Image (cartoon, grey):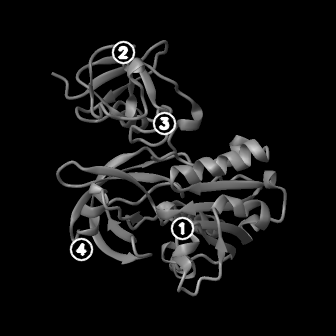
Amino acid sequence: MSNTFNIQIAGSDRSYSCEPGDTLLRAGLRAGLGLSYECNAGACGTCKIDVVSGEVEDLYPEATGIKQRDRDRGRRLACQSAPRGDCTIKTRVADEYVPRHAPARCEAVLESSRDITHDIREFSFRTTAPARFLAGQYAMLMLQGGAQRAYSMSNTANEDGVWQFMIRRTETGRVSNALFALAAGAAVAIDGPYGLAYLREDSERDIVCIAGGSGIAPVVSILDAAAQLEHPRHLGAWLFYGGRGPRDVPAIDRVLRSHGLNRNLEWHPTISVPALAEGTDWTGEVGFVHELLPRKLPKPLTEYEYYFAGPPPMVEATVRLLVAENKVPQSQLHFDRFF
């Protein structure tokens, strides 16, 4: 009996192998196929497929990225479906989704961690293999016991096997709370890289990064990678960051300097809850982070390349401002939808 399952793409001569327990999406990406996806967590719905034949296990029946009427028609989320045998699926395949670095699962050890804000901590893990990914991508951190969650890397690719993640701790976050309790030497698994919001090195437009919460991680990676390219347009960049109150705003100079950023950066933090600044020395902006873009950027908004990450309301407001209100082409916006 074969140890892998054969997955056929309906209407084509494409097929790939899937290990038992792996998902249809991740196995396809490991095989180098451009299967459509974004969040890899069952929330966005981008990876919907039709199961033409065969049987799959639904790993997340409560996933919000698919409605019951779709399930009744045989549709599933590729990121939350594990085959129980050979299958034929109907799915979108496109060049834009072909991974530059095929995702793989590897064992990692926690080497150190440091606090970025009162609830965001950067974790440094090391693997025996090189850390190969594109700036702005994410990986699945998998704990003993099976709990896993997607987190963006905050460093850049390296041959030393160092993977760094800035992770925000939440009261109900099963994975984040477990990570914050880890001691140096603890073992985890890293599965990646994934994600489409990576640095476009061939773009001639200036870089604008917008972040909220732990969304600071991928944009730090992007800015650091851009600085290393030594391209004339990378001599300056804009970073906008939104927090609820002053203690949510990272000491960005320290964070960026630790990542080797050697460029002129315009740093524009803002807070959205004025009451949280009372009794503090906050003298910065007050308001939502996307509202700063028209006021702070010197050129028309259509002349920049945008990278952003953060809470869904921030992402949605930023997309609305740029695309609907200022006619910025969607191709100049880069973000992965997380919920």
Identify the residue position indicated by label 4 in the image.
184
Residue 157 seen by the camera: no
The quadrant the N terminus occupies is top left
How many numbered markers are drawn?
4
What mark, if any, has residue 55 been given in the picture?
Answer: none
Dot 4 amino acid type: Ala
Identify the residue position indicated by label 3 in the image.
37
- Which of pointers 1 and 3 lies earlier in the amino acid sequence? 3
Identify the residue position indicated by label 2 in the image.
72
- Which of pointers 2 and 4 lies earlier in the amino acid sequence? 2
Identify the residue position indicated by label 1 in the image.
243
Dot 1 amino acid type: Gly
- Which of pointers 3 and 4 lies earlier in the amino acid sequence? 3
Circles 2, 1 touching at the beta carbon (< 8 Å): no
On the picture, is 119 further left or further right than 306? left
Query: Residue at coordinates 47% horizontally, 32% vertically from top-left?
Result: 45
